[in-house]
Amino acid sequence: MAALGGANLIYGLGMLELGITFDFAQLVMDNEMAKMIKKAVSGISVTEETLAVDVIKQVGAGGEFVTSDHTFQHFKTAHSQTKLIDRRMRDTWLGLGGKDFTERAYEVAISILENHKPDPLPAGAAEKIREIVEQAEKEYGINK
């Protein structure tokens, strides 16, 4: 994720040591945090549906909302869906290996590097990129 929207560019994803070092796991972690920030700044939708006044009246004060169809329909949109931060109880987390944020990020980065198959560039794209580079080289007096 390069930007949160518009001109609000997030700079330095994956960079360490003032940009001297690049780390794929750091890129994965920074991307995860950027998605969480994007979710937070996008605000909360306040509508008749999201307020769920009818559900609140039906369940009542001190009632239980977890098994409500409304909760099931909306719980994934209420917060960021992080894949790297484990929010389980400590004993459960430890029982599943106790991998922290960094360990999970390295696993994701390695998986991407080993398995990702990018879509090929459209026809003519490589030639257009070469043309742009050659124009820049000419403009800046760069000799090949």
Image (tube, rainbow, N blue to C red):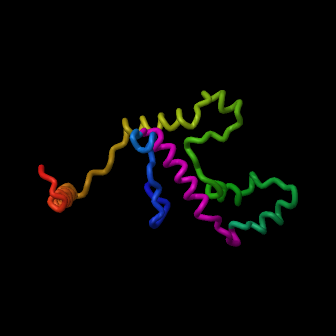
Of all residues, the one furthest to the left in this rendering is: 144
Can you say whether 135 is above or below 113 in the image?
A: below
Q: Position of residue 126 (x, y in %)?
A: 20, 55
The picture places residue 92, in percent across and down from the top left corner, at 68, 32
User: Residue drawn 49% across and 60% down?
Assistant: 4
> Is residue 123 visible to us here?
no
Q: Which residues are magenta?
A: 23-49
Name the image quarter holding residue 15: top left
Q: Residue 128: percent from the left, percent from the top?
A: 19, 60
Image quarter in which the N terminus is found: bottom left
Residue 23 is left or right of residue 135, and the answer is right
Q: Which residue occupies 37% across, 42% down?
A: 116
- Is the residue 34 above or below the residue 41 in the image? above
**Frontmost residue, 23 versus 100:** 23
Q: Is residue 49 above or below residue 111?
A: below
Residue at the extreme bottom:
48
Is residue 90 shown left or right of residue 122?
Answer: right
- Residue 61 location, x and y as percent? 87, 60
Residue 56 in view here:
yes
The answer to whether 50 appears left or right of 61 in the picture is left
Q: Please say if 7 is above or below 21.
A: below
Which residue appears at 57% of the width and 55% of the height?
Answer: 37
Query: Would residue 87 be counted in the magenta stretch?
Result: no
- Camera-side residue: 121 or 43? 43
Q: Nearer the viewer, residue 138 or 29?
A: 138
Residue placed at 41% from the left, 44% from the top?
19
The overriding secondary structure of the stretch rendered in magenta is helix
Q: Is residue 71 left or right of residue 10?
A: right
Query: Looking at the image, how many numbered discs can be counted on the residues?
Result: 0
**Image quarter for residue 87?**
top right
Instruction: Report if residue 46 lies within the magenta region.
Output: yes
Q: Quadrant of residue 78?
A: bottom right
